[in-house]
Amino acid sequence: MRPLPRGILPPVVTTFRGEVLDCGAFRANLQAFNSTELAGYVVLGSNGEGIYLDDDEALRVADVAAEARSPDKFLIVGTGRESTRATIALTRRAGRAGADAVLVTPPAYYRASMTPAALEFHYQAVADAAEVPVLLYHVPRFCPVTFEPAWVCRLACHPNIAGLKDSSADVVFLTTCLKDRPGGFRVYVGTANLLLAGLVLGADGGILALANVAPQECVELLRLVERGEIECARALQHRLLALNETVTTRHGVPGLKLAMDLVGLHGGEARRPLSPLSPENRQALQAALRQAAIRPLIAAGRPLPGDSDAPR
Amino acid sequence: MRPLPRGILPPVVTTFRGEVLDCGAFRANLQAFNSTELAGYVVLGSNGEGIYLDDDEALRVADVAAEARSPDKFLIVGTGRESTRATIALTRRAGRAGADAVLVTPPAYYRASMTPAALEFHYQAVADAAEVPVLLYHVPRFCPVTFEPAWVCRLACHPNIAGLKDSSADVVFLTTCLKDRPGGFRVYVGTANLLLAGLVLGADGGILALANVAPQECVELLRLVERGEIECARALQHRLLALNETVTTRHGVPGLKLAMDLVGLHGGEARRPLSPLSPENRQALQAALRQAAIRPLIAAGRPLPGDSDAPR
Amino acid sequence: MRPLPRGILPPVVTTFRGEVLDCGAFRANLQAFNSTELAGYVVLGSNGEGIYLDDDEALRVADVAAEARSPDKFLIVGTGRESTRATIALTRRAGRAGADAVLVTPPAYYRASMTPAALEFHYQAVADAAEVPVLLYHVPRFCPVTFEPAWVCRLACHPNIAGLKDSSADVVFLTTCLKDRPGGFRVYVGTANLLLAGLVLGADGGILALANVAPQECVELLRLVERGEIECARALQHRLLALNETVTTRHGVPGLKLAMDLVGLHGGEARRPLSPLSPENRQALQAALRQAAIRPLIAAGRPLPGDSDAPR
Amino acid sequence: MRPLPRGILPPVVTTFRGEVLDCGAFRANLQAFNSTELAGYVVLGSNGEGIYLDDDEALRVADVAAEARSPDKFLIVGTGRESTRATIALTRRAGRAGADAVLVTPPAYYRASMTPAALEFHYQAVADAAEVPVLLYHVPRFCPVTFEPAWVCRLACHPNIAGLKDSSADVVFLTTCLKDRPGGFRVYVGTANLLLAGLVLGADGGILALANVAPQECVELLRLVERGEIECARALQHRLLALNETVTTRHGVPGLKLAMDLVGLHGGEARRPLSPLSPENRQALQAALRQAAIRPLIAAGRPLPGDSDAPR
């Protein structure tokens, strides 16, 4: 099994034409990322609208990603479902489809019942059954349960639990996990807003929505920290914060997709009930991109008509 | 189309043997309810572990319910999914399977994007496409978005949006909906804790987890209010509150299922990661049932072995 | 000691001219209330800006209330402070000033330290030292700590703890207290929004900001429930809800004071940083008063210039 | 006016004998701090139980601090009150007592009314009236209102508003203030948990409860960041985090006071309803201090009996 890399990975968007999967656009995005210093990509994560796909669509996306990936990029597939049983089933299928690892959101629907013991049980059962390493995914913004460092670090000792993506913005949680984790357990910052803080505190990298739009800048921030150039890193973090707030915090998946369109990649519309930005918000997002002076990254080409799954 | 009834309906549990659907037990529960004054039943609601079923399982449950129902009982099927597209698809299949109406939870995963406009769009699109009446379902405990009376009452004017189940425990929200709703729009209290308060404020009935365990008592409370016997109603509400707190608030779906086993119906285990009660909690629940002096309702019979879907 | 009454009491506002206490206006309001069926009044409660007064001002208000009260009205004085020591000191002074009982908000500044044990200790110490009965005051909107029925009902057995004002809007909490309280312990609903629900569940009355503006309507709702006229009570509750939302929920103390001015009583401005309503909000409030068709209650007369404490 | 310093300042505790001010112990603590590299001290902050003191006691504490201070240490006095009027009065008295600056918590009791406009008005009025520079204090843990970078940065342009203490643990808020503030506006991290992150992001120092117990270590972390020794800084931050969680997050003011006793300074008991630690918690705190290997700082000497204000 490949060890989880240090570095920056984007949780890539899933592209649609109308409401139908558009695999050509999806492939073109990955090919564009293949030319960067990104460490890999995450498909079917929160920004990948995994929650809006049925299992067949999800597997189709994983298959296309496995084909389009560059061999030096690490491929992570999001496979969290509400039931342990469904999570295991999808995890095993993702492993067979070519995922290097899976990223597993916690069950959160019955959140009053999601005690530490229930969550620990769930992750242990998934890791026992998985054929590839499992990453825990702490993301109370979408899955409103709270992780505790104590059980995270217990799970981190499971031979098949290899890392954590922390999107909680809770620096005390993050720092505690970083100081108490066993050797080799990877911790990724889950939002560009905390990239500098997280790296300085010891994180191994970031899985960042913003890395879809500004991959080179996110990688650069990591390099600056590695070289100890803290003042330059701070200036870059300040620059990225405003952009990230506009693109993802304020406008969510539709904002991220529009920003990708604007930098020459393939975003397109999200599935409903997510809705496109209003003209005013669209302009604000364009202004934020200009102000952040992002270097564009051109996608490998417009997808050919026959390359799409639509219509079917 | 049948109008939505006044009265009490239980959101029935989905029964499993191991983790496999147990349709015989499910049928037996409905048959037991057929002998009561319940107005109908809701299948695949929050307490029905709908979130843990794939679409085929969900349809199987709807089919069995449509067979087992008594013609005088109203059958509501839960069909909420995160995407508008998937909600419409399941809603149409449920209508064809024999549902009299559907109960639709709001999308909540991308909750920062679930603006009033997005939620209103979603429900309107579902109602436009549905072949049976739609009930809105306000349940921030499971789907953490908050409804506003203004758009609820706008949607209530849609010819195919027929009612609201309110499980929010927000009496101001409930009262505002009751006073501002158009004529004929049904409002059901969503928790036995607020049954008396809700009925006095004008609600048409309740869709109550507790009605699985104490159907006769829940119906009796409604009758007492209808007859203006407020002091008796108060005493019964006090009695039901403590039971409901123990059964559902404290122990969720596993608590409800255990309580059903204890009153002679079919509960069984929930799917994981929901976990069975500890021995201490089990005893506390038994004590609460004894103290509330619930009159048992015997299920129509143990399911025959061949009646189960397991194994497959 | 007088037993706490059943009935409706307004938490009266403290009146200022500029930022200086205006005792004449305050007295005129109480005199207006003396002509009603209100059971008494609460001074220095949350709506009385007690938190904005120094101890001398607070005692001055209590003294004026003690003079202006009608002998058949029950006088409650708010004496909650953050430290046990200061609460006891003010409570004893209020008792000597003529309070029939005191209403004590919980300490909440160090809320992480305000465990059930700490709150129980505090109330016990205050009750031990008080010369008049103590009412507990559950008001998480202003004092963000949460009461638990278990310790509330333990404290309710203290010979000097006589009642509870519950402004939490948590019907489960309220119902649990009502069903588990010892005999003679008074429970008052703390918001007009829940008056009907609370009374039907067994509450003894209400301490309601709205009773400053619509005292006759609040008393009428109580009488309707006492006579079992639930449908009329419901219609009145629906009418009062919209008004109460506009007056107090939406606009707080300044909204309440403006509404008092508009019905012929003395409101005036609140102390800063509370600020007067915008012209639009002022109009909305006027419209809400008109729509609710409140019967005006004229204050005893404009205060004479020399009757004010200002200037000093 | 002295400019606000870069550096670390402890918000010092207020010492009592029984419940009476113990000025000798208070003076001894300041004298111990005078021998360190701390930039100054904050008296009557949240950890100083300012909320439990009457105005005379508060002024007495400020006077003693002004006498005991070393001329090279910066003296900040907490003067936030709920009303604008009371805040101004105490601020002016603190200035005359010798404060170099004041630290002002936001009014939060009527938090629904504390709109951005109301908070901005309040701080502007206080700053207009103050004779010494004003620091804004963002501390939702105690004062549950949320600051917004936009109005903070507007206020930061007021000639008499000189800085911000941010105890919110919201890194996005902190980073936004740091990147958007005008030149010369000081920003202090308000919790040792975020000291490294905050400094790397550009903060000027910290006002840290932990600096009462581990002043030398807190200063050392600042020096390490100034010298670019990020790995050593990280190791020290990891070490301080666990200690800070035990001392202040978990046990609040009583925990901080006990820790001061244990390192040879004067803590003593807090005023009630704050209560001393249980024996188990006391042991856990001792263990945390040992594990963090804090270098003790001995207070200047036990206060002489006659030096105390008790009894009076």
Image (cartoon, coloured by chain):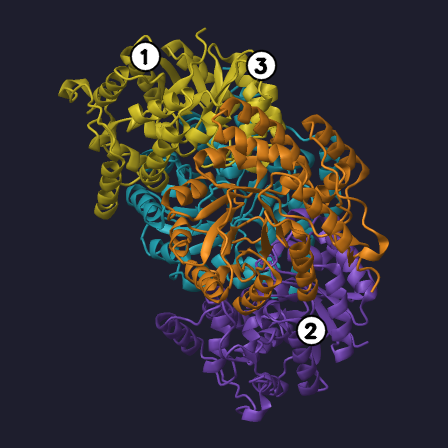
Chain colours: A orange, B purple, C cyan, D yellow
Residue, far left? D305
**Which of the two marks, 1 or 2, is nearer to us in this view?**
2
* Label 2: how many Cα within 10 Å (few below 14, some 14–19, many 20+): many
Q: Which of B53 and D238 is in front in this view?
A: D238
CB contact under 8 Å: marks 1 and 2 = no
Quarter of the picture containing the C terminus of chain D is top left
Give the residue pinned by disc 2: B77
Q: Position of residue A166 (x, y in %)?
A: 51, 46
* Disc 1 residue type (three-letter): Ala
| Mark 1–mark 2 distance (CA, rounded to whole Å) | 72 Å
| Label disc, if present, on residue D76 of the rendered structure | none
Chain ID, mark 3 = D
Please state which of residues D201 and C19 is positioned toward the viewer in this rendering.
Answer: D201
> Disc 2: which chain?
B
Report if residue C175 is visible in the image. Answer: no
Mark 3 closeness class: few <14, some 14–19, many ≥20 residues within 10 Å: some
Q: Which amino acid does label 3 sit on?
A: His
Q: Which residue is drawn at 36% across and 55% down?
A: C151
Residue under the point 58% across and 37% down: A192
Kind of element beneath mark 3: loop
Q: Position of residue D303 (x, y in %)?
A: 17, 21
Under circle 1, the secondary element is helix
Residue A111 picture location, percent across and down: 52, 59
> Which disc is residue D66 wearing?
1
Residue D128 vs residue C57: left or right? right
The correct choice, above or below, for C121 with respect to D57 in the image is below
Query: Residue C21 placed where, x, y %?
Result: 52, 24
Residues marked 2 and 3, same chain: no
Q: Distance between the Cα atoms at labels 3 and 1?
A: 26 Å
Give the spatial CA distance, label 2 vs label 3. Answer: 60 Å
